[in-house]
Image (cartoon, rainbow, N blue to C red):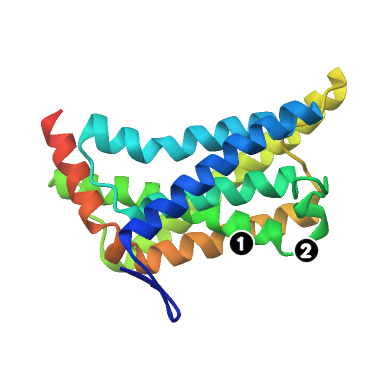
Amino acid sequence: MTRFGSLRLSKRRQQQLSYGMELCLVGLFFIGLERGSIGVIVNSIVALTVTQLPKILERDYGLPMDPRLTLWITSAAFLHTIGTAGIPGANVNLYVQIWWWDHMTHALSASVVAAAGYATVRAMELHSDTVHIPPRFMPIVILIFILAFGVLWELLEFTLVIVSGAVGLQSVLIQYGATDTLKDLLFNSIGGLIVAIWGGIYLTDFSASLAARFGAD
């Protein structure tokens, strides 16, 4: 079971929550079509694609995907998309209406990216005798990785806003300025730090299976 405070979630409940969010993403896609919103349509498609990754990794590559990991990934994709789409019927952008929504989604999404980076680095370390990162340096490696990814993401946001404005289309992503960018990088770092501290506990089996996959290749 997974425990959040006094709330305990069985594996079955975690799977149900993941499926429920996937169904909501399908609904958001059709809401985007009804509104004619390119941003909602594209974000829904990307989010649905991301939520399928755990199933693909488990089915096609034999990597064990704990329901907690699946729920983690699905939650990040879902919360970002619903923040962009807003509450159905209200047409309210949660990123604009709720001041902490952007910070929450950046930290959560960054933690997923950091987890992928951690698992890959740890798998390479287990697979190869030439790769060794002392445990005390792993948090630094993860933070550097997530900061680099965060900078690339912010550059992507700026580029999409500029290009969309030039061609007269709605931007898929929204950029709120330099101050917001700095805050995004800060919360990216928080998400990466969480993974750096607890990644060894929750990603051990996945990293070992990934290392075995490297050996099979």
Decide which of tag 1 and tag 2 comes sooner along the chain. Answer: 2
The quadrant of the rendering that contains the C terminus is top left
Residue drawn at 67 percent across, 47 percent down = 82
The quadrant of the rendering that contains the N terminus is bottom left
Q: Amino acid at mark 2?
A: Trp
Numbered circle sitting on residue 99: 2
Q: Position of residue 70 (x, y in %)?
A: 39, 49
Label 1 residue SS: helix
Q: Quadrant of residue 211?
A: top left
User: Where is 166 relative to 121, above or below?
Assistant: above
Q: Position of residue 89 (x, y in %)?
A: 80, 45
Whether residue 130 appears in this view of the structure is: no
- Mark 2 burial class by Cα count in 10 Å: few <14, some 14-19, many 20+: few
Q: Amino acid at mark 1?
A: Phe
Numbered circle sitting on residue 187: 1
Q: Nearer the viewer, residue 113 or 79?
A: 79
| Mark pair 1, 2: CA separation | 13 Å
- Mark 1 burial class by Cα count in 10 Å: few <14, some 14-19, many 20+: many
Residue drawn at 67 percent across, 55 percent down = 184
Numbered circle sitting on residue 8: none
Q: Residue furthest top?
A: 167
Residue drawn at 62 percent across, 41 percent down = 153
Q: Is residue 101 left or right of residue 135?
A: right
Q: Position of residue 49 (x, y in %)?
A: 49, 32
Label 2 residue SS: loop
Q: Position of residue 122 (x, y in %)?
A: 26, 51
Label 1 close to label 2 by CB (< 8 Å): no
Q: Nearer the viewer, residue 199 or 144?
A: 199
Q: Nearer the viewer, mark 1 or mark 2?
A: 2
Q: Is residue 102 left or right of residue 109?
A: right
User: Where is 10 relative to 206, above or below?
Assistant: below
Whether residue 185 appears in this view of the structure is: yes
